[in-house]
Image (spheres, grey):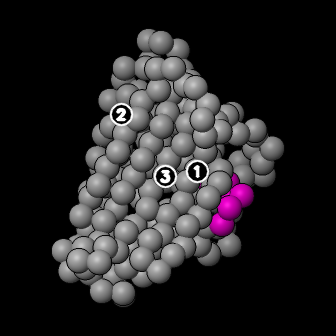
Amino acid sequence: MGNSANDVRYLDEWRRAPLTYRPGLDLTGAHTDHYEVCLSAAADEATFGQATDHLLRYHNYPPDVMDHVSDFSRSNRRMRVGDRIIQRVHLLPFVDVLMMNEVVRVTSETRRTGFACITTTKHDEIGQWSPQIEHRPDGTLWLIIDTYSRPNVPWFAQGIGRQMQLRAHRRGNEHFRHLITS
């Protein structure tokens, strides 16, 4: 694994990297994924607040899958629209890939919190990732994630890339659930 502490420089170097996706863009061959993970069967406001804080600080993946540095982590705050995120994805031992996303929406309501980030030209996919936390009237707390992405890599890497993406989704969902239940 690389040294994500040094990745902060890419926030500045890649600052002007254009977004590669806008809602409604036809991405023929795109993957769509939808996840609903029950985080708690009986959550109170404190648990919802804890989940919100983890979500808006991008604590979505375990460190062996991905590290990140961002405008908001650099300032030790929650994310805001326009913040950039550098992801260091750990593919194989000693093989990491750096990518950049931008936060384009942050939702903060009484019982629902979430965000959406869109890929930039410094990413190996084109698409959007949108997680949210819902505290439902029955007291349950849910993590809901919608993704829409098309690989932006050579055809021969797409199959393994998709397998690794699905593994990262699964591991991220497990990790986030563990953050809330422990």
Under tag 3, what secondary structure? Answer: strand
Q: Is residue 85 magenta?
A: yes
Residue carrying label 1:
117
Q: Nearer the viewer, mark 3 or mark 2?
A: 3
Dot 3, how many residues are within 10 Å of its Cα: few (below 14), some (14-19), or many (20+)?
some
Residue at the image position 40 percent from the left and 35 percent from the top = 32
**Residue drawn at the location 52% of the way across and 15% of the way down:** 154
Number of numbered discs overlaid on the protein picture: 3
Secondary structure beneath dot 2 equals helix
Residue at numbered disc 3: 130
Check contact, mark 1 vs mark 3: CB within 8 A: yes
Q: Which image quadrant: the C terminus?
A: bottom left
Q: CA distance from mark 2 to mark 1?
A: 19 Å
In the rendering, at what x and y percent does residue 37 appear? 26, 58
The image shows residue 27 at horizontal and vertical percentages of 55, 25
Amino acid on which disc 1 is placed? Cys
Residue 5 visible in the current orientation: no
Q: Give how far apart the Cα atoms at labels 3 and 2 are.
A: 19 Å
87 with respect to 121 (left or right): left
Q: Amino acid at mark 3?
A: Ser
Does residue 171 appear to the left or right of 145 in the view shown? left
Q: Which residues are magenta?
A: 80-86
Position of residue 180 in the picture relative to residue 80 (left or right): left
Q: Which disc number belongs to residue 164?
A: 2
Above or below for 130 versus 106 = above
**Which one is earlier in the sequence, the residue at label 3 or at label 2?**
3
In space, the residues marked 1 and 3 are separated at their CA atoms by: 7 Å
User: In front of the other: label 2 or label 1?
Assistant: 1
Disc 1 residue crowd, few under 14, some 14–19, many 20+, Cα 10 Å: many
Q: Amino acid at mark 2?
A: Met
- Residue 132 magenta-drawn? no
